[in-house]
Image (cartoon, rainbow, N blue to C red):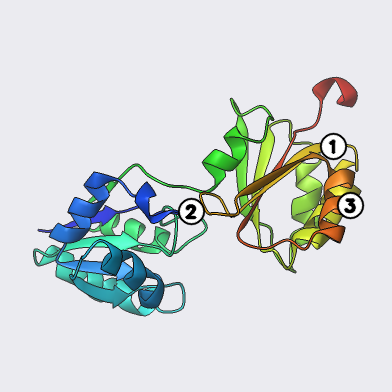
């Protein structure tokens, strides 16, 4: 039987990839990629010419069975996403679960995940935190925001630049505009930036400065003393 490797890829600078990740990608029989066009840039940069197969949220339910069958037949597969660690707000969970249920060995390499540097550089407590990923765009969004009002841990969210102001405004409505937070964008890229302050200050900043790039929002948890 073969094996499935989960391989994190850089969220910004291509040189952030680990030596081990490169070796696994070079040795794999097949590389499963969220977007073959995006991944081709990375693989070409490191002269990796292995078979590249599309595996994303729109086709994974159709392809997972054949992928698992190939691994059971002895194939070594490496799963990558456009950036970061597969399964973290990216495709991966379905394949991993199916492989685990089929008794296939799954190994995840340590590596890039966007929320870790954003959390650590936020200046907010990072000993205990909760990762919320992307908030629901429509159904369940208000319920989710309401649930966060009692969260005492630091909260980490992903967002697109097009919805950043909307999300910051709603967080201010539900958590209070004086709640401390930070917005990190373009992590590990040339224009990397972290803006810190209250939610009100962040809203003012990004109202006059158009946000661009991939966004990580870090928000302080509620103060237990204020609740009691």
Sort mark 1 into few (<14), some (14-19) or many (20+) by Cα contacts within 10 Å.
some
Q: CA distance from mark 2 to mark 1?
A: 26 Å
Q: Which residue in the rendered view is the most extreme toward the front?
A: 190
Figure quadrant of the C terminus: top right
Residue 121: give its label.
none
Query: Disc 3 or disc 1, which is closer to the eye?
Result: 3
Compared with 161, 226 (above or below) is above
Q: CA distance from mark 3 to mark 1?
A: 14 Å
> Residue 77 vs residue 207: left or right?
left
The residue that label 3 is drawn on is 204
Q: CA distance from mark 2 to mark 3?
A: 30 Å
The residue that appears at 78% across and 55% down in the rendered structure is 143
Instruction: Using the image as rendered, state which of residue 29 and residue 196 is in the foreground.
Output: 196
The residue that label 2 is drawn on is 88
The residue that label 1 is drawn on is 179
Circle 3: element type: helix
Residue 3: x percent and y percent? Answer: 17, 56
Which tag, 2 or 1, sits closer to the chain's start? 2
Q: Residues at badges 2 and 3 in contact (C-beta under 8 Å)?
A: no
The residue that appears at 68% across and 40% down in the rendered structure is 155
Tally the numbered discs.
3
């Amino acid at each position: 039987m073969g094996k499935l490797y989960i391989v994190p890829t850089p969220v910004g600078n291509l040189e952030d990839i680990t030596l081990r990740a490169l070796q696994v990608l070079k040795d794999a029989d097949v590389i499963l990629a969220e977007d073959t066009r995006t991944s081709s840039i990375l693989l070409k940069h490191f002269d990796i010419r292995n078979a590249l197969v599309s595996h994303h949220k729109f086709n994974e339910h159709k392809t997972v069975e054949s992928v698992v069958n190939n691994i059971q037949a002895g194939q070594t597969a490496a799963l990558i996403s456009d950036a970061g660690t597969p399964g973290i707000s990216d495709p991966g969970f379905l394949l991993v679960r199916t492989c685990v249920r089929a008794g296939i060995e799954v190994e995840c390499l340590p590596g890039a995940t966007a929320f870790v540097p954003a959390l650590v550089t936020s200046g907010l407590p990072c000993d205990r935190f909760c990762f919320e990923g992307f908030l629901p765009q429509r159904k369940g969004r208000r319920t989710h925001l309401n649930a966060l009002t009692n969260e005492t841990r630091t909260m980490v969210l992903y967002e697109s630049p097009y919805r950043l102001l909307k999300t910051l405004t709603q967080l201010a409505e539900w958590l209070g505009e004086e709640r401390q937070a930070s917005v990190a964008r373009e992590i590990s890229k040339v224009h990397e930036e972290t803006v810190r302050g209250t939610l009100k200050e962040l809203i003012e900043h990004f109202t006059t400065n158009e946000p661009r790039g991939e966004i990580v929002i870090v928000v302080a948890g509620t103060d237990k003393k204020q609740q009691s």
